[in-house]
Amino acid sequence: MKKIIVVILVATTFISCKTYQTTPNNEQIIEETLEKWHKAAAEAKFDNYFSLMTDDAIFIGTDPTENWDRKAFESYSKPHFDKGKAWYFTTIERNIFIDESGKIAWFDELLDTQMKICRGSGILRKENGEWKIAHYVLSITIPNDNTNEVVKQKTKFDDALINTLKAKK
């Protein structure tokens, strides 16, 4: 009799655990998508990395000239991935927001990188039931106390680029 009771208790416990399992929510799936994206870069897995982006994705890098559509970003990135070493970003902090439709999300994140702390921000779009990165902006963070020093270091470059861009208008 004791064996039957033990079997019933174990079976009931197992069944109740399965009943209460939850499916991941959008925020969890977005979190996983971003982590897979960063991991694919760290492991230099080109196809995995770009499969997590929309076909019309935009990537804005830390250099003011880095504003790429997906095709241009793939061209820039391919040699890095081919060397087996792209970039390695680990998440320190992330905030995720989802619109009412459940089809658009935006986020900001602090990252530990080879450039020290950087900020990433972007937009994801749900396509065919999957979250994909549609727009990403990577920025190097500068403590306010160091702003004047950094501005001095980049003034010559920025002034030349400003003049070039203004001349194109």
Image (cartoon, helix red, strand yellow):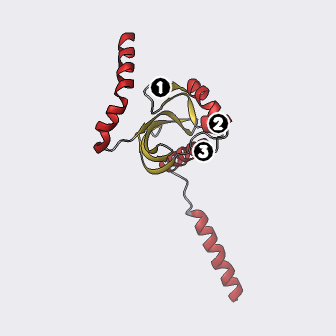
- Between disc 2 and disc 1, whose residue precedes? 1
The residues tagged by marks 1 and 3 sit, at their Cα atoms, a distance apart of 21 Å
The relative height of residue 54 versus residue 113 in the rendered view (above or below) is above
Give the number of the disc on residue 67.
Answer: 1
Disc 1 is placed on an element classified as strand
Compared to 23, does 43 lie above or below? above
Q: Quadrant of residue 38?
A: top right
Verify CB contact (< 8 Å) between mark 1 and mark 3: no
Image mark for residue 81: 2
Three-letter residue code for mark 3: Ala
Q: What element carries label 3?
A: helix
Question: How far separated are the C-alphas under marks 2 and 1?
Answer: 19 Å
The single residue placed furthest to the bottom in the displayed view is: 1
Q: Is residue 148 left or right of residue 118?
A: left
Asked if marks 2 and 3 touch (Cβ < 8 Å), the reply is no
Examine the rendering and report whether any part of residue 169 can be seen.
no
Residue 62 x %, y %:
45, 33
- 57 shown above or below 4: above
Residue 5 position, x and y percent, is 66, 84
Amino acid type of the residue that numbered disc 1 sits on in the rendered structure = Asn
Mark 2 crowdedness (10 Å alpha carbons): few <14, some 14-19, many ≥20: many
Whichever of labels 2 and 3 marks the residue nearer the N terminus, that label is 3
Q: Residue at x 37, y 10 (%)?
A: 167
Q: Please name whichever residue, 136 or 12, is drawn nearer the observer in this view of the structure.
A: 136
Tag 2 secondary structure: helix
- Which residue has dot 3 on it? 42
